[in-house]
Amino acid sequence: MKKQPLNFPGIKFRSNSLYMEFLNQKRTDPRVRSLALELALYVKLLGSELEVTQIGRTKRSQVRIYGYDRKSGHRERPSRAIDFSGRNISREIINKLVEHFKFYLDLGYYYSLIYHDVGAGYHFHLQVPHAKYNKILWDINSGG
């Protein structure tokens, strides 16, 4: 992978394209990006690191995961959701990270950090609420 010009403490990217997507405010909602950076700094202070695994999601990817083009923060532009691998993070740090989010960063409805598995392994899902500038990409008439 090509060296990334900006280094953020506590966060790494699975690919250079994810890194570029993270930097692009037309692709990643600045609100979710700022929360991700705060969580990454906190995890770094605890001696670990978050790995970004997904930001935007294609319809094909969404159908592969859920069986249909389900409504999701990953399916808006800019994306208002980011997934992080939980593979190399201890249960103790996972619990501290979720508590840190709840105490400092949960600003209301649809601000969320969950640790779950939807079939591809446990991961963190960070999301912010829909804003009027987010463009919906799923087909509302498809039942999703």
Image: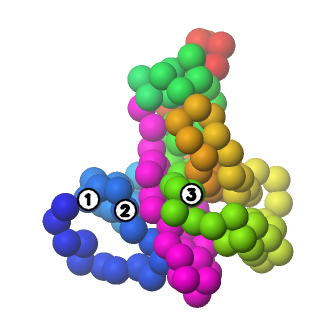
Q: Secondary structure at mark 1?
A: helix
Q: Is residue 40 visible?
A: yes
User: What residue would you read off at disc 1?
Assistant: 16
**The residue under label 1 is which amino acid type?**
Asn
Q: Secondary structure at mark 3?
A: loop
Circle 3 or circle 2, nearest the eye: 3
Q: In whole angstroms, how far apart are the C-alphas of marks 3 and 2?
A: 13 Å
First in residue order: circle 3 vs circle 1: 1
Tell me which segment is drawn in magenta: 32-58
Q: In whole angstroms, how far apart are the C-alphas of marks 3 and 1?
A: 20 Å
Q: Position of residue 13 (x, y in %)?
A: 37, 62
Q: Quadrant of the C terminus?
A: top right
**Residue nearest the viewer, comparing 53 with 138:** 53
Would you say 130 lies left or right of 87 here?
right
Q: Position of residue 118 (x, y in %)?
A: 62, 34
Q: Position of residue 48 (x, y in %)?
A: 53, 76
84 lies above or below 46: above
CB contact under 8 Å: marks 1 and 2: yes
Inspect the magenta stretch and tell me whether residue 51 lies in it. Answer: yes
Q: Residue at left 61%, top 83%?
A: 46
Q: Quadrant of residue 107?
A: bottom right
